[in-house]
Amino acid sequence: MRVVLDHITKRFSDVTAVSEFNATLEDGELVSLLGPSGCGKSTLLNMLSGILPVSGGKIYFDDQDVTSMPPEKRGIGLVFQNYALYPHMTVMGNICFPLETQRVPKAERIERANEIAKLVHVDMLMNRKPSELSGGQQQRVAIARALATNPKVLLCDEATSALDPKTTRQILELIRDINQKLNITVVIITHQMSVVKEVCSHVAILDDGCVAEEGM
Ligand code: ADP
Ligand code: MG
């Protein structure tokens, strides 16, 4: 899916977190948003996913204006730095959860969870709890959970920032693999230049809520 951000602005009372941000993410592209802490990356991502309303501007998915569409209707998968897994649920339970919310029948949920778990290589960990997993494994599960409902866009907010360099590379390889195999648009948000160099074909650099630079 093609994503267009057209003059997106976010104001929090006295702070303008994102200012007239423009970008076009082509269908199937792996894009990175790079910028220092506090420059508005998460705010932008949260507007893209619909968690935060915009103060100004428009968001389009293909030709549809989704600016006021609620998050659950947008078809977006989210991955965060802190994994945010449900601690009392197994890996299977975590991956199935978004499908349960969508009232997918149980047999279908399990089949889908097994399929996606294979793709991210956690299929041998299905009965473990998050506390029994390494950071890299937890992030794989979080990615599987984000993909369970077949989103058209995957948004990763500092998804590798809590991981060591080797695990970071493995997770980035996985994300690239998912981007190619599932042909979904992926946005990687990071403050680490090394992450961008590793995976992305297209990068937008943010500075104080504006695009400072764009390139390959
Ligand atoms: P980044 O993800 O790039 O580190 P953020 O998008 O989290 O940056 O924050 C951008 C700016 O917006 C910061 O100055 C931050 O303090 C401010 N900000 C973010 N969320 C809120 C909020 N809910 N209320 C007020 N200010 C906020
Ligand atoms: Mg952030």
Image (cartoon, rainbow, N blue to C red):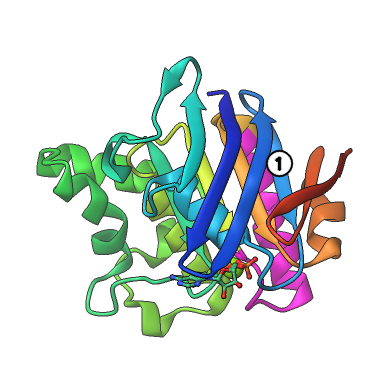
Q: Is residue 40 left or right of residue 100?
A: right
Q: Residue at x 33, y 74 (%)?
A: 128
- What residue span does the magenta drawing correspond to? 158-179
Residue farthest along the bottom direction in this orientation: 131
Ligand 1 is found in the corner quadrant, namely: bottom right
Foreground: 20 or 201?
Answer: 20
Q: Position of residue 144 (x, y in %)?
A: 43, 52
- In this view of the protein, can residue 93 be seen by the observer? yes
Quadrant in the picture for residue 87: bottom left
Whether residue 56 is in magenta: the answer is no
Q: Position of residue 42 (x, y in %)?
A: 56, 61
Residue on which disc 1 sits:
31
For residue 18, above or below residue 137: above
Foreground: 146 or 61?
Answer: 61
Q: Position of residue 130 (x, y in %)?
A: 37, 77
Residue farthest along the top direction in this orientation: 63
Q: Label the magenta part by its dominant secondary structure.
A: helix
Q: Residue at x 40, y 83 (%)?
A: 132
| Mark 1 secondary-structure assignment | strand
Residue farthest along the front direction in this orientation: 14
Label 1, residues with CA under 10 Å away: few <14, some 14-19, many ≥20 = many
For residue 187, above or below residue 11: above
Q: Position of residue 110 (x, y in %)?
A: 23, 46
- In this view of the protein, can residue 121 be seen by the observer? no
Foreground: 137 or 183?
Answer: 183
Whether residue 168 is in magenta: the answer is yes
